[in-house]
Image (spheres, helix red, strand yellow):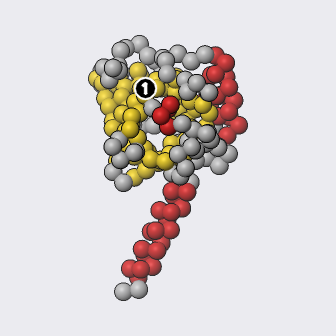
Amino acid sequence: MKKIPIFLILVSALILTASCSSIPEKAEPVTNFQKDRYLGTWYEIARFDFKHERNMNNTIAQYSLNDDGSIRVLNSGYNYKEQKWKQAEGKAKFRGDETVAALKVSFFGPFYSGYNVIALDENYQYALVAGKDLDYLWILSRTPALPENIKNDYLKKAQEVGYDTSRFVWVEHDKKNPNLK
């Protein structure tokens, strides 16, 4: 009988430890964040490739409010190998104060991962988003193109955090995404 409570304590400690590591060590989320200004459509300009976005171009993320105050996330893009559009819907929640851009996002039920805006221009047109560790990074823009000075600033910021920016996949936007309204 005593093994069950010890097992539960170990599992709880593991979950707590995993949830604390939702941002790379040298990364800092943006403060004075305004959720309402961040909502809307973002074009994915570059990303570190991972299995859920592999072979995807024309990728966008659309953020809107759910009735419960969480953020609806609709990611979509064109899989050029399968030659078809794909989308995934998820939910994001703040990990603490809503004026700090440290969120967690889930596309798979109760499992959440870090979503941290670590650079954002004052007009909410360009964002650098860090995942839970140095394997996840995105550059987003309100338009399909990114000014060279913003690109250079974000590459420098990412390198300072410890990212290997040579891993970036630069996303093409050569098709009209049917999810754009």
Element type at mark 1? strand
- Which quarter of the rendered picture does the C terminus lie within? top left
Total number of numbered labels? 1
Residue positioned most to the bottom? 1
Query: Is 139 displayed left or right of 42 in the figure?
Result: right
Q: Quadrant of residue 80?
A: top left
Task: Pick the residue in front: 39 or 54.
Answer: 39
Task: Pick the residue in front: 82 or 153.
Answer: 153
Task: Pick the residue in front: 165 or 178.
Answer: 178
- Which quarter of the rendered picture does the N terminus lie within? bottom left
Q: Dot 1: within a 10 Å radius of its alpha carbon, few (fewer than 14), some, or many (20 or more) residues?
A: many
x and y percentages locating residue 171 in the rendered image: 48, 22
x and y percentages locating residue 86 in the rendered image: 31, 29
Query: Is 138 displayed left or right of 161 in the figure?
Result: left
x and y percentages locating residue 18 in the rendered image: 51, 58
Query: Is 4 displayed left or right of 121 in the figure?
Result: left
- Which residue is painted at 58% across and 47% down in the image? 23
Can I make out residue 62 in this image? yes
Q: Which residue is mark 1?
A: 41
- Which residue is painted at 33% across and 43% down in the image? 67
- Which residue is painted at 56% across and 18% down in the image? 146
Mark 1 residue type = Thr
- Which residue is painted at 61% across and 16% down in the image? 147
Can I make out residue 49 in this image? no
x and y percentages locating residue 91 in the rendered image: 38, 43
Q: Quadrant of residue 92?
A: top left
